[in-house]
Amino acid sequence: MIARLTFFLDLTSAEHPLAVDFWRDVTGYQLSAPRGETDEFATLLPPAGDDHLRVQRVGDGPAGTHLDLHVPHLSAGVEHAIGCGATLVAREDHAVLRSPGGYRFCLVTAPATAPSAPTVWPDGHRSRVDQLCLDVGPSAHAVECAFWAALTGWPVRQTPRGEFARLAVPPALGVRVLIQRLEHDEGEVRGHLDIATDEREAEVRRLVALGAEPIHQGPIWTAMRAPAGPPVCVTGRDPVTGSTD
């Protein structure tokens, strides 16, 4: 049983300082002390509740995201993941694996957590980085959906917009995983983070002031190029429940 999901921003050495400052401002969170053999890891710490967003310096790159799944027993988790179609990349006190479409994820052991609350900004609107969106080419989409459902034990449910499917993460975990079918194959599966907000225009303006640039406007989302690191989407969803209602 998966007790927790943690989102990682994987940042090149060149992008790391600017990207970390950007995401601190995006979330309103404090940054933990660095850790790891070369101080490559840090956590974005909400004022209440437990963390779900971390940053990692990955040297020359490429920049991107990865997902940590917190499991009770590492060996059993690795065996299960490989049986579902994952490829083991490395194993120490945690395991690094890749999905059939090439998305990197880790299995780690840690207890369940209490989700953080949305940040309330001075104008009264709220936002929270709450969702990892996996960007999957059409040839890998069905396989990836089946893989993540088998790996987690959570079904994948189609949304009204046909290009999006949602992994049914238990609400108690406080985060979400979306699987987007791209129009064309674009190499290995990659991922980006989504911000849920109750005032999308206000949140977009706030990110523009932090150095982000809008690149595409959808029905309920605005895709943005961050000043450093992977792109981000601002989505008009409830920042507590993730609902679009």
Image (cartoon, helix red, strand yellow):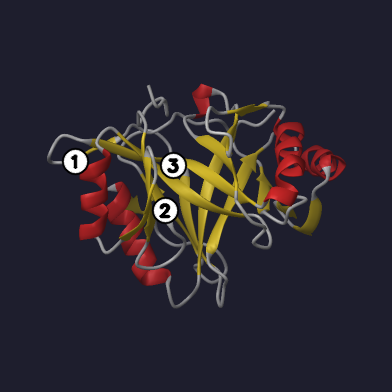
Would residue 148 be found to the left or right of residue 43 on screen?
Answer: right
Which residue bears the numbered disc 2? Answer: 232
Quarter of the image where the N terminus is located: top right
Q: Which numbered disc flags the more N-terminal residue, 3 or 1?
A: 3
For residue 189, side relative to residue 75 (left or right): left
> Label 3 to label 1, Cα distance in Å?
19 Å
Q: Residue at x 12, y 39 (%)?
A: 123
Question: Crowdedness of circle 3 by 10 Å Cα count: few (<14), some, many (20+)?
Answer: some
Q: Amino acid at mark 3?
A: Asp
Of mark 2 and mark 1, the one earlier in the sequence is 1
* Residue 121's disc number: 1
Give the answer, above or below, for where 93 lies relative to 152: below
Residue at point 37%, 21% (across, down)? 245
Q: Which mark is residue 51?
A: 3
Hey, what amino acid is under mark 2? Val
Q: Please state if 40 lies on the left or on the right of 156 as rendered.
A: left
Q: Given this view, does label 2 or label 1 mark the residue nearer the observer?
A: 2
